[in-house]
Image (cartoon, rainbow, N blue to C red):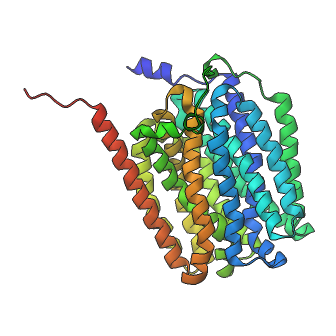
Amino acid sequence: MAATMDQERRAMTQQQRTTLYMVMGVTLALDAGNGVVFGLIAEIQDTHGITTPQLGLISASLFGASLLGVLGLAHLADKGHARTMLLSGLALGAVSTAWFGLATHLWEFVASRALSGIAVSLFISAGRSLVTRIDPTRAGENLGRLAGAEITGFIIGPVVGAGLYAVGGLSLPFFVLSGIAAAAFVFFVVKFPHHDGPEDEVPRPATRQSYRQLTGLDLLGNRKVLAAALLALAVFLPVGAYDSMWSKYLHDLGASATFVGTSLTLYGVPLVLLSGRGGRLVDRLGPMTAGKRAITCAIPVIVAYGVLDSYWIVALTAIVEAVIQAVASPSAQAAMAKACPPDRIGAGQGLAGAFGLSGGGLLASVAPAVYDRYGAGVLFTSVGVLVGAIAIAAFALDASANARLTPATQPA
């Protein structure tokens, strides 16, 4: 048995590692551009006269476009187009970040974030599909590393953005991050292999697929797939509130733009350091078991944000959530990879992304209005309750699916 496990967990080849690290690099570059918006949203609001409820429109456009993208484009990762998807995501990410730096009207901010959402949808589907396929025995670990790259980019963006904002004003951070994404695009074109190896070849269906097959919606007939999608929704849902309100919330508590960037760094460091280990824990315990433990720990932390009155304590509490997310995020992605047929992994990851983005987008669109009218306590308590309810439904569905697959014990 030990020998079998050693064989299953053999070290990745150089080519597999190169593919993994380059996908992580793409993700980092794209999320840095998204993160700079996150960190400077309060300054954008003050400079351009955007109301707090209108912040919801800007955030919701990102989530809405990402949702449409993952539903319409994720299946391409199952047909050998993952490399093209990553390149397209980088190009669109560079353009959208530069446009955000040039924008002066609400519709421009909404449109540039929507374009960024298409970029997000491309790399979510392609990146997660690639890192899952290069070594299925390390799916959780590699997905965890990819999540770490996402967070690294997301925390670099605000930190760099705050520094550049102090030096050159509001537009400079977006131009610099756009340039970084453009440079990553050139490097990716030159260095990334066209073919990752025989283990990564995926079937290319010759028959015409229906809309439900192209979007992955047909997979929802499988209870385990639906359970994994709901788990992804539960894990990703709070991001909608954070995306539209974190900077504003800390700003109202007295934090500066620099501290907002610092808070994201404090949040991101544990995720970066622990995401690989969290993924290995998911591989060892199983995605649903790991996800159940992580979400049980996360809910009290989410609720706590609403009752804290110090931005320092909020930032320190976020560190606790980051440790939990190092397990929660790869558990949801690995659950979907495990539930899907091998030739539908890309569609499945797109479906998980669609659930997360739809929930996050809806929450991002209403969170500013809820916060403005009822305060942080009602907002974050409601988010915690929603996360708990969705997670309970996911685990119940998975248990039901397992019960159907397990033959009843025959009486002696």
- Where residue 359 sits, quadrant-wise, is bottom right
Q: In this view, does 192 lie to the left or right of 144?
A: right
Residue depicted at 13% across the width and 27% down the height: 410
Q: In this view, does 219 lie to the left or right of 75?
A: left
Residue 274 x, y percent position in the rendering: 57, 47
Q: In this view, does 150 lie to the left or right of 191?
A: left
Residue 291, placed above or below residue 63: above
Residue 147 x, y percent position in the rendering: 62, 46
Comparing 106 with 288, the one in front is 106
Comparing 3 with 193, the one in front is 193
Q: In which quarter of the image is the N terminus?
A: top left
Residue 210 x, y percent position in the rendering: 58, 33
Residue depicted at 40% across the width and 49% down the height: 394
Residue 370 x, y percent position in the rendering: 57, 76
Residue depicted at 89% across the width and 65% down the height: 171
Asked whether the viewer can see residue 286, the reply is no
Q: Is residue 374 left or right of residue 112?
A: left
Comparing 47 with 19, the one in front is 47
- Where residue 26 sits, quadrant-wise, is top right
